[in-house]
Image (spheres, rainbow, N blue to C red):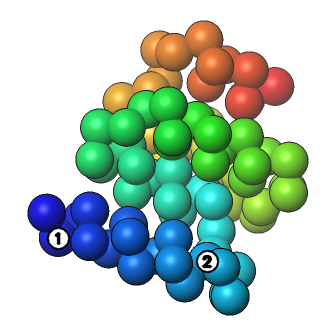
Amino acid sequence: EKARELLRELLETRKTKPFSPFDLAILYLNLGDRESAFAELDKASLYRVPQMLWVGSEPELDPIRNDERFFKLLQ
């Protein structure tokens, strides 16, 4: 429940302050929401978020490594 509350706060804060879609993707993954995680990773890729340089080795992304969409992100 604390993670969901944090997510709500971050989404509200994001309306007025920038927040990394990469970090939101990891939070979504921790909540088991793969679809939202991929949506945020797509944004991170589009906006060229520096953290995307480590997308291939970030251990927190392990739960989605076998997903075809992950391979597309690596390209």
The residue lying toward the viewer, choosing from 27 and 62, is 27
Q: Is residue 48 left or right of residue 37?
A: right
Q: Position of residue 42 (x, y in %)?
A: 72, 40
What residue is shown at x 48% (from left), y 24% (from top)? 65
**Taking 38 as reference, is 30 above or below it?**
below
- Secondary element under disc 1, as helix, strand or loop, is helix
SS at mark 2 in the image: loop
N-terminal label among 2 and 1: 1
In the picture, the quarter occupied by the N terminus is bottom left
Up-down relation of residue 45 to residue 9 (above or below) = above
Residue located beneath label 2 in the image: 14
Q: Give the image location of residue 71, x and y in percent.
A: 66, 19
Residue at 63% in and 19% down: 69
Amino acid tagged 1: Lys
Whether residue 62 appears in this view of the structure is no
Q: Is residue 28 visible?
A: yes
The residue carrying mark 1 is 2
Q: Give x and y (percent) for residue 27.
A: 39, 57
Q: In which quadrant of the rendered image does the C terminus lie?
A: top right
For label 1, the crowd category at 10 Å Cα-Cα, with few meaning under 14, some 14 to 19 and many 20 or more, is few
Q: Label 2 sits on what residue type? A: Arg
Q: CA distance from mark 2 to mark 1?
A: 18 Å
Q: In this orientation, which residue lies closer to the viewer: 59 or 3? A: 3
**Where residue 35 appears, x then y in whole percent?**
50, 31
Position of 63 with respect to 25 (left or right) is left
Mark 2, Cα crowd under 10 Å, few <14 / some 14-19 / many 20+, is few
Query: Residue at point 24% right, 65% down?
Result: 3
Does 74 appear above or below 51? above
Mark sitting on residue 68 = none
Q: Residue at position x 72%, y 30% from top? A: 73
Total of numbered circles in the picture?
A: 2
